[in-house]
Amino acid sequence: MTSEEFPAALRAVGERGYHHLHPFHVRMNAGELSPGEIRTWVANRFYYQRSIPLKDAAILSNCSERDVRRVWLHRIVDHDGAEGVEDRAGGIEAWLRLAEGCGLERGSVLAGEGLLPGVRFAVDAYVNFARTQPWQIAVASSLTELFAPDLMAERLAAFRCHYTWVPDWAFDYFQSRVTQARVDSEEALSLTLRWCDTPELRRRAVGALRFKCDVLWSLLDAIAAHAC
């Protein structure tokens, strides 16, 4: 794969396999999910949210390039938050607010009550991938962020239109990711295009992104199967 072909190959993976195409997401955006299905999704998706800093820490631990680590480091704070900084509560806290807005008990979500085995397996596989692959390949797997802003905007509109029983203050995570995901995806894409500089690394990067799409798809498969 040439450097000229590489960006289009990455985008093609998401266009065909990103989880916005999953039937569960299609139903969500159409307003067809019950409150119970929404709560199941929120509670299980939290396991993914809380694992993102573990994935990013694994990438940092494998990366010998100081300049890359400096670029990537903020992601852990973005999700974990910063102690004593009110406007840096972080993505994990924002997701917990979503859970509370949906009627879930904060403590039960933190304890992982109702976590489905298929969700745990998929998320753990993603964290393990980041730990065991070269950092360039793990960075490439995060490029599902290229497609996240549009999904977040659609999701926010769908919740406000169809799930009016969820208060607006619960949507901080969706609102922040509409803009933050654009910054993060541009950052990750720049690193991937720069550091995946051989045909073999480019091939592996495309495979890594395909794997990440499969992780997100499998997560929804488990949730949808439980809802049936």
Image (spheres, grey):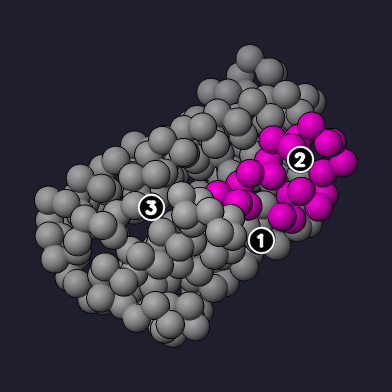
Q: Where in the figure is residue 152, as x and y percent of width and height? A: 34, 44
- The amino acid marked with disc number 1 is Leu
Q: Is residue 69 magenta?
A: yes
Figure quadrant of residue 153: top left
Residue visible at 14% across and 66% down in the picture = 165
- The amino acid marked with disc number 3 is Tyr
Spatial CA distance of label 1 from label 2 is 15 Å
Camera-side residue of 43 and 25: 43
Visible residue check, residue 218: no
Q: Which type of secondary structure does the marked residue at label 2 adopt?
A: helix
Q: Where in the figure is residue 61, as x and y percent of width and height? A: 81, 52
Q: Which of the labelled discs sits on residue 69, or is there none?
A: 2
Q: Is residue 102 above or below residue 176?
A: below
Figure quadrant of residue 147: top left
Where are the magenta residues, as a range? 57-79
Q: Which residue is mark 1?
A: 54
Q: Which residue is mark 3?
A: 173
- The amino acid marked with disc number 2 is Arg
Q: Is residue 46 above or below residue 129?
A: below
